[in-house]
Image: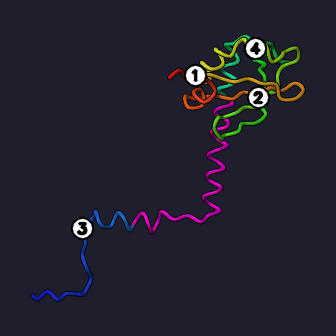
Amino acid sequence: MTLVSSGVSIRPVDQHTGLVGRRFGWRPGWWQRRREAEELARWAHEVMWQWNDTMEGTGLAYRTLSAGGVPVWVVPQVQSVEARPPVTLVVRVLPGQIVDDFQEQAHRIAAGMEVPMVHITPYGHGRIKVALLDHESVSAVMSLPA
């Protein structure tokens, strides 16, 4: 039996892994933008759920019963989430609440949102803006001694 070369080069398996990523890793631009928007929306919903859980522990939400007798928590509602640093929430406060109520609980809000500090400011009638400050933002806001 005689073996005749077919001209096909044979490479080790690890050399093909780079080709697979290039061949199957490309996605159309519209698909990538849609995936990024979906990921951003999923992340924003997680931030909203974390806000709801945080409000239950701060005394800024109250528990009531629905028309069917089911216990529910009524919390200040997140209207929007801005993803750029610092992450900022626009929140509609409950009737009777003022900015000072949230500023008094800022340490609990920061702990519940898992950030070192929050900055709470009024944002129109019945709304507040809550900036979640990370370590870089905190050092920019507070001048640290040299």
Disc 4 to disc 2, how far (Cα)? 15 Å
Q: Sort mark 3 into few (<14), some (14-19) or many (20+) by Cα contacts within 10 Å.
A: few
Q: Is residue 97 above or below residue 2?
A: above
- Residue pictured at 66% horizontal, 40% vertical: 83
Residue 102, image quadrant: top right
Of tags 2 and 3, the one toward the viewer is 2
Quick check: marks 1 and 3 in contact, CB under 8 Å? no
Q: Quadrant of residue 97?
A: top right
10 Å neighbourhood of mark 2: few (<14), some, or many (≥20)? many
What amino acid type should be assigned to the residue bearing mark 2? Lys
Residue type, numbered disc 1: Pro
Q: Amino acid at mark 4?
A: Leu
**The stretch drawn in magenta includes residue 34:** yes
**Secondary structure type for disc 3:** loop
Lower sequence index among marks 2 and 3: 3
**In the figure, is residue 1 to the left or right of 28?**
left
Q: Position of residue 66 (x, y in %)?
A: 82, 18
Q: Mark 4 touching mark 3, by CB under 8 A?
A: no
Residue lying farthest to the left in this orientation:
1
Residue 129 has which mark?
A: 2
Q: Secondary structure at mark 2?
A: strand
Residue in the picture at 51% in, 65% down = 26
Magenta highlight range: 20-48
- The CA span between labels 1 and 3 is 50 Å
**Reading the chain from its start, which is encountered first: label 4 or label 2?**
4
Q: Nearer the viewer, mark 4 or mark 1?
A: 1
Residue that label 1 marks: 116
Tell me the distance, in whole angstroms, between the alpha carbons under discs 2 and 1. 17 Å
